[in-house]
Each structure stands twice: as C-alpha cells, then as structure tokens.
Image (cartoon, helix red, strand yellow):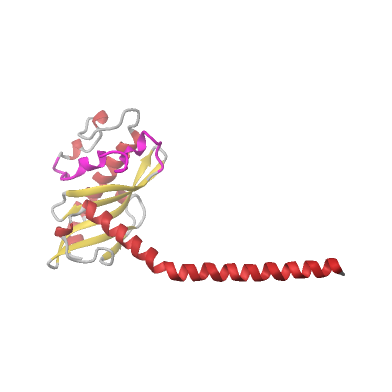
Amino acid sequence: MDLIASIRRNSIGLGIFAILTAGLIATIHLVTKDTIANNMLKAQIAAFNDILPASRYDNDLTKDTAILPADKLLGGAPVKIHIARKNGQVSAIIFETVAPGGYNGSLGLLVSVDRNGIVTGARVISQNETPGLGDKVDIKKSNWILSFNGHSLGNPGLAGWKVKKDGGDFDQFTGATITPRAVVRGIKNTLIYFKQHKDSLLAR
C-alpha cells in the first residue's frame, strides 16, 4: 500500500510539474513572440537594404510581395518576389530564388534587379558548402558576392556570365569552382527571367 501511495504521489507531482512547465513555456512564448517577430522583420529589412539602397524605394518591401510560378530559370519551384517602388513606379524586383548545382546542393539567393535589368546586389542566404572553400560565397566569409553589383546581361554579355575557369568574367575560389559556378549561373538565370517577363513584372 505504501508503494502504491508513493507512486500515486510521484505521479501527481510530475503531472503538476508538467502543467506548470507547459504554462511557463506558453507565457514566455506570448511575452516574447512580438519581440521575436519584430527582430526578424528588422533583419529582413536590413538584408533588403544591403542589396537595394533604401533611397531607391518608398514602400514596404515586406508586404509588397508576389509569388511567381515555378520556372526552371528560378530553380524549378515557385519563387517569392519583393516589389520595390519609388513614387508609385516599380524601381526594382528582389527575387528569393534558388541556384541548383552547388557542391552540397542548392543555394538560396536573394537577388535585386532594377527596372533596367541591372543587379543592384545579391546575397547567398542559405548554403551547405564546404567551410573554408565553397562557403566563401557568403558575405560573412568574403566579399566575392559583391562582384555582381552593377552587372547585367549586357555587362559583361552572356558569354561573360561564367567563372574565369570556364572562360567568363567572374572569379572562382582556389580549390572550389562548383559553388561559385552555381551562383553565377543562378544570378544570370534570374536576369534572363527578368528580361523575359520584364513587362509583367514592372506592371505589378
């Protein structure tokens, strides 16, 4: 009987502890969720401003968005875009696109293209490349990604949209060509998509 009573007391104690713990977690979540959401929003806006100067738009990029249908040029899956406007006119499109063919899989890209088809900036926002080699596509590891700023399909021309090892204009890394090759191809394909759909993109 003592053993049964002891088990019962322990079970009740554990149950109360579980309820209190769950309540505490729920309370913390409610208290902090707005702060977390606000911090995420600030980080997203900062990322946008890294690739498109704030002076070039006056709308809310986090809300002025659209989903593009799957297209091979954009990685083969639906892609979210952020539409930048200045005085009511579309000034640039920011693509959340994908570059397939990295050394360890696809890479997530953020590519800003202005209304003239010029890259204002690009960032690799997700990757699983080899540390010290392929991960240099990340702005935190090197400035390589900045080499796309100001370029377009006409500058350097389609033939130049390759790494130098393949006869193009863009550097690769020592011991790592696959990753930068995928990024160059991904940004080039984004520009091609923009050119093919320019009228509809700028009419949004």
Q: Residue at x 36, y 44 (%)?
A: 100
- Judge from the rendering whether residue 142 lies leftward or rightward of residue 150; answer left or right: right
Q: Quadrant of the C terminus?
A: bottom left
The question of residue 135 being in magenta is answered with: yes
Above or below, comparing residue 174 to residue 202 in the picture: above
Point out residue 70 in the picture as x, y percentages from the top left corner: 34, 56
Q: Residue at x 26, y 60 (%)?
A: 82
115 or 33: nearer the viewer: 33
Above or below, comparing residue 147 to residue 20 in the picture: above
Image mark count: 0
10 or 97: nearer the viewer: 10
The question of residue 118 being in magenta is answered with: no
Point out residue 182 in the picture as x, y percentages from the top left corner: 32, 40
Point out residue 136 in the picture as x, y percentages from the top left corner: 32, 38
- Judge from the rendering whether residue 161 lies leftward or rightward of residue 31; answer left or right: left
Above or below, comparing residue 49 to residue 2 in the picture: above
Above or below, comparing residue 141 to residue 1 in the picture: above
**Residue 68: quadrant of the picture:** bottom left
Q: Residue at x 22, y 35 (%)?
A: 170
**Residue 94: quadrant of the picture:** bottom left
Q: Quadrant of the N terminus?
A: bottom right
Provide the residue span drawn in magenta. Answer: 128-155
Point out residue 196 in the picture as x, y percentages from the top left corner: 20, 53
Helix, strand or loop for the magenta stretch, by majority: loop
**Residue 9: quadrant of the picture:** bottom right
- Judge from the rendering whether residue 96 lies leftward or rightward of residue 194; answer left or right: right
Q: Residue at x 28, y 41 (%)?
A: 185
65 or 6: nearer the viewer: 6
